[in-house]
Image (tube, grey):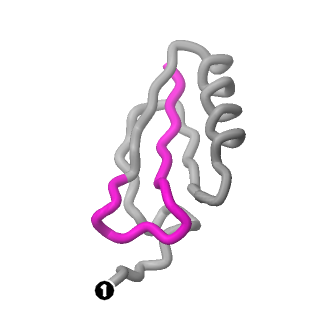
Amino acid sequence: MFFVTILWGENPSKDDEPELYYFNTEHEREAFMTGVNTAMGWQDYDVQFHSTAKKFKHEEFDNYKGEDDE
């Protein structure tokens, strides 16, 4: 299995949970990422590629600044 976890958004808050996606082949994962990159537009995200299912902390993503919109 091939995994990718994405924290969606340009400046996600602590309430925005990273999303885990899994694929049977690396080719499927790369096709998904091509779609993500194509559709990104003005939105942003940070991604973690990994070989086992894993839960990531917000702080492990570059786009998480630790700030919330109030």
Residue 59, position as x, y percentages in the image: 44, 68
Name the residue that disc number 1 marks. 70
Q: In the figure, 61 relative to 69: above or below?
A: above
Which residue lies at the image location 55% right of the left edge and 47% below the top edge? 48
Q: Quadrant of residue 13?
A: bottom left
Q: Quadrant of residue 54?
A: top left
Q: In the figure, 23 relative to 49: above or below?
A: above
Q: In the figure, 57 relative to 19: above or below?
A: below
Residue 2, position as x, y percentages in the image: 53, 25
Residue 10 or residue 58, whichever sits in front = 10
Residue 66, position as x, y percentages in the image: 42, 79
Residue 18 or residue 57, whichever sits in front = 18
Q: Is residue 62 magenta?
A: no
Which residue lies at the image location 61% right of the left edge and 28% below the top edge? 32
Quadrant showing the C terminus = bottom left
Q: Disc 1 on helix, strand or loop?
A: loop
Instruction: Tell me the magenta residue range.
Output: 1-17
Left or right of 47 on screen, residue 68: left
Number of numbered callouts drawn: 1
Left or right of 44 on screen, residue 69: left
Q: Looking at numbered disc 1 in the image, what kind of residue is underneath it? A: Glu
Which residue lies at the image location 55% right of the left edge and 66% below the top edge? 10
Q: Residue most toward the bottom? A: 70
Residue 25, position as x, y percentages in the image: 59, 14
Q: Residue most toward the top? A: 24
Left or right of 16 on screen, residue 60: right
Which residue lies at the image location 32% right of the left edge and 69% below the top edge? 14
Neighbour class for label 1 at 10 Å: few (<14), some, many (≥20)? few
Q: Is residue 11 magenta?
A: yes
